[in-house]
Image (cartoon, helix red, strand yellow):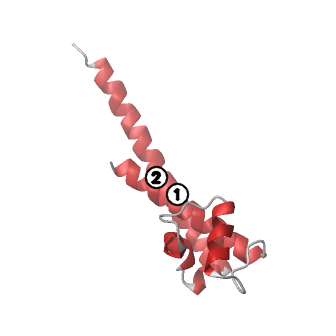
Amino acid sequence: MEAQILRERLDILDAQCSFVAAVRDGSLTLFHSTEAELVAALGERGYASKGDDFDGFSHLLQLPASTFTGEGLGALSLERGSAEEQLGGLRKAAAQYAREQVVTLP
């Protein structure tokens, strides 16, 4: 269960990093777009939505403005790296546990 929660968190962090980078480099513009256009653009780019409307992308569209600075993106990337390490550690522990269970079978 913990691995699933971490995987979901990592997916959100990946999307946020990608979104912030796209806005920063100008490949995705938020200004002068309607909500419908923005939702369509995010869907076309493959961002996961938790619904069919603007609110479904709140994990992207409600990021603080400071996230779009170099420091903000750096902090987001560090958080993503930490989540990746935690997930990797859980996977290793699960694999080790499984090996131990196989060895101790009667």
- Tell me the SS state at disc 1: helix
In this view of the protein, can residue 39 be seen by the observer?
yes
- Tell me the SS state at disc 2: helix
Q: Quadrant of the C terminus?
A: top left
Residue at x-position 68% and y-position 61%: 44
Answer left or right for 22 relative to 1: right
Q: Nearer the viewer, residue 14 or 46?
A: 46
Total residue callouts: 2
In the rendered image, the vertical position of residue 72 relative to residue 100, given as above or below: below
> x%, y% of residue 20?
65, 73
Residue on which disc 2 sits: 7
Residue at x-position 43% and y-position 41%: 91
Q: Amino acid at mark 2?
A: Arg
> x%, y% of residue 3?
39, 48
In the rendered image, the vertical position of residue 11 relative to residue 67, given as above or below: above
Determine contact: label 2, label 1, CB under 8 Å: yes
Name, please, the residue furthest toward the left: 106
Residue on which disc 1 sits: 11
- How far, Cα to Cα, is label 2 from label 1? 6 Å
In this view of the protein, can residue 77 be seen by the observer?
no
Answer left or right for 81 relative to 90: right
Name, please, the residue furthest toward the top: 106
